[in-house]
Amino acid sequence: MNNKHQFRARVRNVNYEYLEDYQITNDYSNIGEALDAILEEHEELKKNHWNLQYISHTVAEIVKERISYELNRVRLGTNNTDRNTQILIELLQGYMQLQNVRHIRQRICIRLSF
């Protein structure tokens, strides 16, 4: 059996009118039942809100981890490309020294004139 507690409360007119409309719309016998139903709905919404916050927080964490992982892969790939480019530049410089190339522009102009 549900225990009920009786108390007196003052509410603004607009809230009282809302309670009366809610009572009539949902076919409750008195305003107390209407207030109980509103409070139950409020509790349910509060639980759902908490669940939505939990879900959104969990999804945000998963997305953050995944993006961080992907960005780390991109960073490592870029570093590897930079390292390989540096090696190619050093090889080209070594080849140019071996061939006694003093100026790249001069050498390119000579090759283009043939």
Image: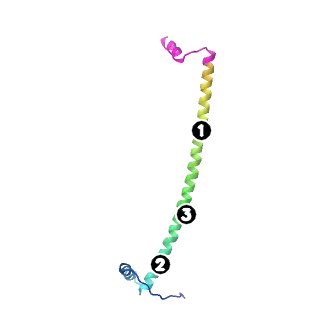
Q: Residue at x 41, y 83 (%)?
A: 10
Task: Name which residue type carries label 3.
Answer: Tyr
Q: Which residues are magenta?
A: 96-114
- Would residue 18 be found to the left or right of residue 77 on screen? left
Mark 2 = which residue? 39
Secondary structure predominantly adopted by residues drawn in magenta: helix
Depicted 50 relative to depicted 13: above or below: above
Depicted 44 relative to depicted 84: above or below: below
Mark 3 = which residue? 54
Spatial CA distance of label 2 from label 3 is: 23 Å
Spatial CA distance of label 2 from label 1 is: 57 Å
Give the percent coordinates (x, y) of residue 94: 63, 20
Magenta stretch encompasses residue 109: yes
Q: Residue at x 58, y 37 (%)?
A: 78
**Mark toward the start of the polypeptide (2 vs 1):** 2
Mark 1 = which residue? 77
**Mark toward the start of the polypeptide (2 vs 3):** 2
Magenta stretch encompasses residue 77: no
Q: Quick one: quadrant of the N terminus?
A: bottom right
Q: Residue at x 62, y 17 (%)?
A: 97
Give the percent coordinates (x, y) of residue 63: 55, 53
Spatial CA distance of label 3 from label 1 is: 35 Å
